[in-house]
Image: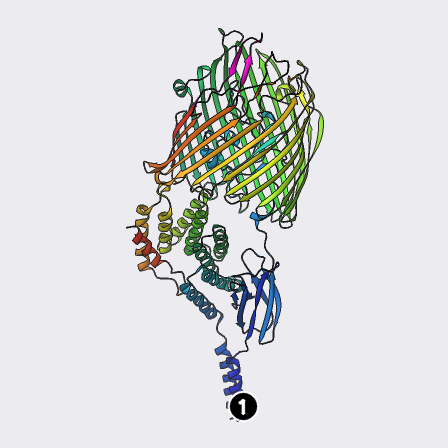
Amino acid sequence: MKILKLTSLFIFIFTLTQAQTKISGILKSTKGVPIANGNISIKNTYDGTSTDSIGRFSFSTTETGLKILQFSALNFETDSVTVELNQTSLTFDLRIKPSINLLETVSISAGYFIAGDGKKGAVLSALDVATTAGSNADVFAAQQTLPGAQTSFSESGLFVRGGSASETKTYFDGMLLKSPFNATVPDQASRGRLSAFLFKGTSFSAGGYSAQYGQALSSALILESTDLPEKTTTGISVLNVGAGVDQNIRFKNSALTIGGAYYNLGPTYHLIKQQNSYVKAPEQLSGSIQYKHKTSATGMFKFYATYGKTDLALYQDNIDEPALPKYFSNNNSNSYINSTYKEYLNSKWKLDIGFSYNRDKDEGLLSQDNYTRKDNLTQGKVTLTNYFGQLSNFKFGAETFKTGRTESLNGQERGYNDQISSGFAETDLFLTDKLVFRLGARTEYSSYLKKYNLAPRTSVGLKTGINSQVSFAYGRFYQNPEDEYLIIKRLDFEIADHYILKYEVNTPNRNFRIEGYYKDYNHLTKENLGNPDNSGTGYAQGFELFWRDKKTIKNGDYYISYSFLDTKRNFRDFPALATPSFAAKHTASMVYKQFIEKIQTQVGATYTFASGRPYVNPSNPVYLADRTKCYNILSLTVSHLTHIFKQFTVLYLNANNVTGFNNVYGYQYSSNGLNRRAILPSSKRNLVAGILMTIGDSTFVR
Amino acid sequence: MKNLTKSLTLILLVFSLNSFAQTSNEKFQTGIKKGLEMLNTAQLSNDFLKMSNYFERIAQAETKEWLPPYYAAYGNLLAGLMIDDKALQDQYFDKALTEIDQANLLSAENSEIYALKGYIQFMKMSVDPQARLSYMGASATSLGKAKILNPDNPRIYLINGQNTFYTPEAFGGGKIKAKPILENAVAKFTIFKPASENAPMWGAARAKALLAQCN
């Protein structure tokens, strides 16, 4: 009895004072660095503790037997060991692997300028484009402040690293955009049709870009549209050049945006003297509709359609007969539809489907001749991406587009159509998080040229430090000759081979890059007095520097870019190898932005310099040997944040060429070579002022 | 007699085993309570990290409870608020977002979760406002959801008032705009009754302090 009582008492006491195991030790990274604030625990229990400032930990547990000891820490991979809790104290020396920090991973970057919120090396967001003085919120104008792109004012487009405007193509969500620019006036650059605010990301590639993109010899401007707007808002813009309205309607998982704009440059042209005498200043009416639908947690369907009409008529100086200026008119209509669908089929596979349609029609009078020109493009594209490893991926896809042009002069018509089909495959192989190889190939078939091509594209990235990386790219690029030559004759693909080497350092607030390149051109189109062929060649080489600092000056942000370009080519109507008129040897830009909190105003300034451009002087036996004087321009912009009728409003003012430099783009000589007229900007100075209001939100939303 | 001794022994044994073993719910409530004590005594960033880790441990053991990941998120948020290193702040806030989303999966349509998420999203934006304006809208959306789910939750008004207080006037914020929201928060805190002793009830002192700065 006594023994029984004693035994029970003993068991009673024993169960109250359970055996405890003391677990202690140290947590270190695989490199031996002690980890503070790591989390050590016994799986499926509450037992555990945090590591101290030198990685040590110590705690007690009443668990017994085989258990799993888990350990984790910020920026490290969670790991565990199986332990046998059968002693009073156990010590562990735990090692933990660092997890992949995407901000410190190497990336494919040779030739690229990535932009967009939060992306590494980001340069231009929609807001950046809008606040860059001189750009007037035009994506293409803003890109010209970056290295690689020449300043262009007498011809629309981006002239990149010695390439002509047709060598740069624009892609909207992966789909080729055939007519990205507004209706053109001869000898004048016009702005892009698409608002910068449609896009969340702009990636400007000056060469060496992915096999997904084709038909561009020099560069690709890759625009990525925004996702669902957060709320229902109304945007109203009233400018001296016109007005626009955007209505965003947000539903549960989708959004509809309807917009309209009307521009009339008449009143502005009355106030600011223009080079051309306008009979009808440009007048544009356009409307757009966008629909975005989040089909699942990872899927998105987008639809965008826009239609615009532009009319203008003017008299241009006639160098041969100054008393008889040349009449030019253009009634332009443009339609564009872009629809994409993306979805992750599972955690390893992603599907992207796209469709686009673009039709651009010009018609009017050229002196006394009636002309029309219709450009069209219909495109379909499918891409599948497979993700493997922790960072690598493999993508492949196919696209086809029907492109063509029909033109007529005084009723006589000619045209052509081409069905270009292509397939591409590319892999980004991350051997480690510091070394990546991109290997890809693209093949195209043009039904009109009746030719195939196969283009390799490769790129390498190697991290040299936490924030620095070296990149190299080689790629071959094919492009059909321009419509104006294809309409005469079936030609062959034009070819460019790019070799690019780049070194960059990127920290959250500062970016530095230096990039060198060599481009070898072959099969360029030569006019040959009306019998075009592909006997043209050329080369382009140079280097570029870029420095951006968002930190040093409080609320200030500036960047400096410099491009050196040495290029010669023999193409179009050139009699010999020469530097083309769109290539300046030195181009430099300085862009500065400052937010002044006290007066809620953002001010910006842009100064651009370019060395003289070549022009044709008939009395010079050497072709394109003459140079214009240097180009200088200083532009200023002011954006003041306020509230009008209690709604968030931005008062905007942009002035180009504030100091009134007299810039000359080139010279046009009379047929007898005795007289010349300077090709000047459309107006010496330019001013845009406006009120931009957002109803329904307290930020600038479009 | 033998039988009595046997039953006594048995009862004693059962009693001793029982007094040691709590019910799993008691264990959970005690665990949360202990964590909340850590929260109340925490002063430095590291203290909040330790508290967050503590709740993370409970979260991995109690996979159906939303309070552990909720408080783990709150701990990481507070740890981030106390330091200057922007890059590290960003990492703490990212971890907090992951944890609050975990809590959301375990308790959908929960006003407290949406309110805390709105707080974390606003702080994510404040790390780099120029590049992250989109988080401002996301924060407002979360707080809006929280309000629909429980308009009496005082933390919604505290967080909204706080966000407004720190938003520049030009963007619709400032002290004047924040004052009525904070007054509402203080009033709601006075009459607030938490669902349980472990349910979120923080913020009353902060609301009063911030309101005082509006005058």
Name the kind of residue labelled 1 in the image.
Answer: Leu
Task: Report the front residue among B116 and A309.
Answer: B116
Task: Report the front residue among A401 and A684.
Answer: A684
| In-image side of B75 versus A442 (left or right) | left
Could you tell me if residue A428 is visible in this image?
A: no
Q: Which residue of the protein is positioned furthest toward the left in this rendering?
A: B215
Which stretch appears magenta?
Answer: A662-685
- Image position, residue B120 (x, y; %): 44, 52
| Count of residue discs | 1
Could you tell me if residue A275 is visible in this image?
A: yes
Q: Is residue B215 above or below residue A129?
A: below
Task: Report the front residue among A277 and B159.
Answer: A277
Q: Magenta-highlighted stretch: main secondary structure?
A: loop
Q: Is residue B103 above or below residue A302?
A: below
Picture quarter with the C terminus of chain A: top left
| In-image side of B211 versus A34 (left or right) | left
| Residue A684 inside the magenta-drawn segment | yes
| Residue B119 inside the magenta-drawn segment | no
- Image position, residue A642 (x, y; %): 35, 37
Determine which quarter of the picture holds residue A531: top right
Label 1 Cα neighbours within 10 Å, binned few <14 / some 14-19 / many ≥20: few
- Image position, residue A662 (x, y; %): 47, 20
- Image position, residue A315 (x, y; %): 48, 12
Q: Chain of mark 1?
A: A
Question: What residue is pinned by disc 1?
Answer: A4
The colour scheme applied to this rendered structure is rainbow
Q: Secondary structure at mark 1?
A: helix
